[in-house]
Amino acid sequence: QVQLMESGGGLVQPGGSLRLSCAASGGIRSINAMGWYRQAPGKQRELVAAITSGGNTNYADSVKGRFTISRDDAKNTVYLQMSSLKPEDTAVYYCNADIQPAGFVRRFLYWGQGTQVMVSS
């Protein structure tokens, strides 16, 4: 059974940095795009960054120049390096991945359980 597990959230001061990780596990045949979303209290979930299997990336305007998404296909893991953090970056961060499970022809979109990031002094 395929699962995504995030880690790396926590409390950080404004201007600080955090690195989030999301590892996919289970019977996986292939992973296509992977991404990070976030949801702040009272707001809709929004795309933060995404990366294709070929390494192409896109970012929300609000995080360009501060966040970097990367992936390690050998580890089935996607990362989000966050720098120059602002209080408005406070949210629950979720990863997702477009995965073809072993034994399946079609692909499915999987989500992690979320990790809290709080930026506060």
Image (spheres, rainbow, N blue to C red):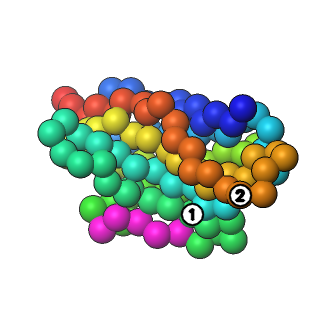
- The image position of residue 113, as x and y in percent, is 47, 31
Q: Residue at x 57, y 63 (%)?
A: 51
- The image position of residue 110, as x and y in percent, is 57, 44
**Is label 1 in a helix, a strand or a loop?**
strand
Q: Residue at x 78, y 50 (%)?
A: 104
- Mark 1 closeness class: few <14, some 14–19, many ≥20 residues within 10 Å: many
**Is label 2 in a helix, a strand or a loop?**
loop
- The image position of residue 25, as x and y in percent, is 72, 35
- In the image, which residues are magenta? 57-61
The quadrant of the rendering that contains the N terminus is: top right
> Which residue is labeled 1 in the image?
51
Q: Is residue 18 above or below residue 68?
A: above
- The image position of residue 13, as x and y in percent, is 27, 33
Mark yes or no: residue 71 visible: no
Q: Is residue 55 above or below residue 47?
A: below
Q: Main secondary structure of the magenta part?
A: strand
> Which residue is labeled 2 in the image?
106
Q: How many marks?
A: 2
- Is 60 covered by the magenta stretch? yes
The part of the image, by quadrant, that contains residue 41 is top left
* Residue type marked 1: Ile
* Residue type marked 2: Arg
The part of the image, by quadrant, that contains residue 38 is top left
Q: Is residue 30 left or right of residue 24?
A: right
